[in-house]
Amino acid sequence: MFQDGRSEDHLIAPALDWTDWDDIAETVHGISRAMLLAEGKPHEEVAKRMVEALTGHDLFASAPSWDGKWLSVLLRGAGLPRHALRLCDTEEALRETATEILRPVLPPARLDIDVHTRSASLNRAPEADGCSSQSGGRFQARRCVG
């Protein structure tokens, strides 16, 4: 999702050689391989659209190593460089935002400690309701400034 509220989502038809499948992920997301094959857009089309729409933006994911693996598969499957788009950890954005908000009201000696404590507590919150940070897989984007 962009800062202005715009977003896109696409079902991706898997390439013929993409045979990796996880029944648990299917259950979590409610998307079957048959649905992807029937309703998904060609992976090349989605990859090119992502590069077109997301180049020049900071991209954040809750599990950048995991999501980055699949992003790389998608990009390479479309004949694009695997690092055409790079993911950052959402926690990084939370820390930056918290630091900006708290800097005027906290002494410098407490700033790093409080920001670390607050961002760590936010990252624990999803597990409290039984969710895993790796079950998401939604990419977020914000415009790069400066």
Image: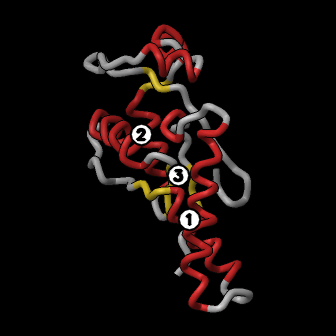
> 24 or 69: which is nearer to us?
24
For label 2, the crowd category at 10 Å Cα-Cα, with few meaning under 14, some 14 to 19 and many 20 or more, is many
Q: Which mark is residue 47?
A: 2
Which residue shows up at 59% across the image and 91% down it?
Answer: 108
Q: Quadrant of residue 22?
A: top left
Mark nearest the camera among 3 and 1 is 1
Which residue shows up at 52% across the image and 52% down it?
Answer: 53
Q: CA distance from mark 3 to mark 1?
A: 20 Å
Q: CA distance from mark 2 to mark 3?
A: 10 Å
Q: Position of residue 23 (x, y in %)?
A: 44, 13
Q: Are marks 2 and 1 in contact (CB under 8 Å)?
A: no
Which residue shows up at 54% across the image and 36% down it?
Answer: 132
What residue did someone put label 3 on? Answer: 53
Q: Are marks 2 and 3 in contact (CB under 8 Å)?
A: no
Q: Are marks 3 and 1 in contact (CB under 8 Å)?
A: no
Instruction: Indicate the secondary structure of the residue bearing disc 1.
Output: helix
> 15 or 61: which is nearer to us?
61
For label 3, the crowd category at 10 Å Cα-Cα, with few meaning under 14, some 14 to 19 and many 20 or more, is few
Which residue shows up at 53% across the image and 12% down it?
Answer: 35
Residue 106 in the figure: left or right of residue 65? right
Counting residues from the N terminus, which is met first, the one under dot 2 or under dot 1? Answer: 2
Residue 116 in the figure: left or right of residue 102? left
Amino acid on which the number 1 mark rests in the picture: Ala
The answer to whether residue 58 is above or below residue 106 is above
Picture colour scheme? secondary structure
Amino acid on which the number 2 mark rests in the picture: Ala
Instruction: Indicate the secondary structure of the residue bearing disc 3.
Output: helix
Q: Position of residue 36 (x, y in %)?
A: 49, 16
